[in-house]
Amino acid sequence: MRVLGIESSCDETGLALYDTERGLLAHVLHSQIALHAEYGGVVPELASRDHIRRLVPLLREVLRQAGCDAATIDAVAYTQGPGLAGALLAGAAFAEGLAVSLNKPVLPVHHLEGHLLSPLLADDAPEFPFVALLVSGGHTQLMGVTGVGRYELLGETQDDAAGEAFDKTAKLLGLPYPGGPALSRLAETGRSGMFDLPRPMLNSGDFNFSFAGLKTAVSTRVRKQGEAADARFKADIARAFQDAVVEVLTQKAFAALRHTHMQRLVVAGGVGANRQLRQSLDTAAQKRHCRVYYPALEFCTDNGAMIAFAAALRLQSGMEVAHPAGIFAVKPRWLLNQCPFPARSAAL
Ligand code: KG4
Ligand code: ZN
């Protein structure tokens, strides 16, 4: 079975072809970083228009790279939510239209399910069950995962997502968009222990997070420093911020492993690309005889491969798919635990 996956929830247009026999055949991506850079963040209307411009050329390209014809696609999957409404609509309309023209079934996919299952794309994939730490620009969640479509929310952020906190803090320090990777590069040049920042909710006794106060603490310190905020100061405060985020994420993730009696931790989402977070989780795992799994770096951030793959797993697990009826909706706000696995059999 061959599934085309289409991702367009934010500022990346990603398309991929996943074959259940042969694995990932090809994946292509267009990032809108340059488009939004001058605004210091994603401009939703520009994002939607760019997705519309990119989808057809990217489809041609992914088919070319995979060396196959559109007629060989068995199902079309797309990100239905959560995300920016206009951006989601661009991908949804394209996917539904393509499915009608090919007379093939269509499968709406939850963006976070794509992230969560993306480490299973690797050769050395984790087995179920596992705890998933989802750390992206829009979400920070710990989930207990016992199978495809079987996700239990253990805890989540009460305010900003980890990636959002990275992006906002980067902006405070005058770093270019996208802030997360830039802040993390700066932090690597800073010294630990120069500033004492809070560890929000570290001892809250649950699996929830809060990052808004941490960003405010950096903002207060930067304001106090005023004109004297030189390169050394910025690197040290970036390091202090990253140390705090990494410590909270690491401790909560391992508390969730203890709580669920699981030994496997899967990290997904853009912040999962952070080198210091990976080092901290790996060190903690060694001490506790656990193992941490990450998606390949190219699949940490948004991409079409994770959408094609999540859809393929659902289809293989017996999910019923609908032929397009010309009516569809996107879900800009959509909780993953509201995305149950339909227990009917596949009609492919
Ligand atoms: O998963 P993703 O591509 O998109 C969402 O679904 O949100 O995640 C993007 C987020 C952004 O906030 C970005 O700043 C952050 O991931 N990010 C990083 C790093 N690379 C991306 N944050 C910290 N360190 C990184 N190396
Ligand atoms: Zn994402």
Image (tube, rainbow, N blue to C red):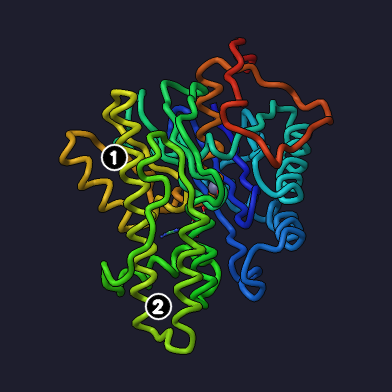
Q: Position of residue 34 (x, y in %)?
A: 60, 71
Q: Residue furthest right?
A: 326
Give the alpha-carbon distance from disc 2 to disc 1, as whole Å. 31 Å
The quadrant in which the N terminus is found is top right
Q: Is residue 280 left or right of residue 117?
A: left
Q: Position of residue 294 (x, y in %)?
A: 35, 44
The quadrant in which the C terminus is found is top right
Q: Residues within 10 Å of mark 1 (few under 14, many from 20)?
A: many
111, 233: nearer the viewer: 233
Q: Nearer the viewer, mark 2 or mark 1?
A: 2
Decide which of tag 2 and tag 1 comes sooner along the chain.
2
SS assignment at label 2? helix
Amino acid carrying mark 1 in the image = Val
Point 32% across, 45% down: residue: 250
Point 29% across, 23% down: residue: 261
Q: Is residue 254 visible?
A: yes
105, 73: nearer the viewer: 105
Amino acid carrying mark 2 in the image = Lys
Q: Position of residue 337 (x, y in %)?
A: 57, 27
- Mark 2, residue position: 234
Q: Residue furthest bottom?
A: 227
Q: Residue furthest top?
A: 344
Image position of 227 with respect to 67: above or below: below
Q: Say the numbered circle drawn on residue 292.
A: 1
Residue 35, picture quadrant: bottom right
Image position of 56 with respect to 77: above or below: below
Q: Say the numbered circle drawn on residue 72.
A: none
Point 70% across, 59% down: residue: 47
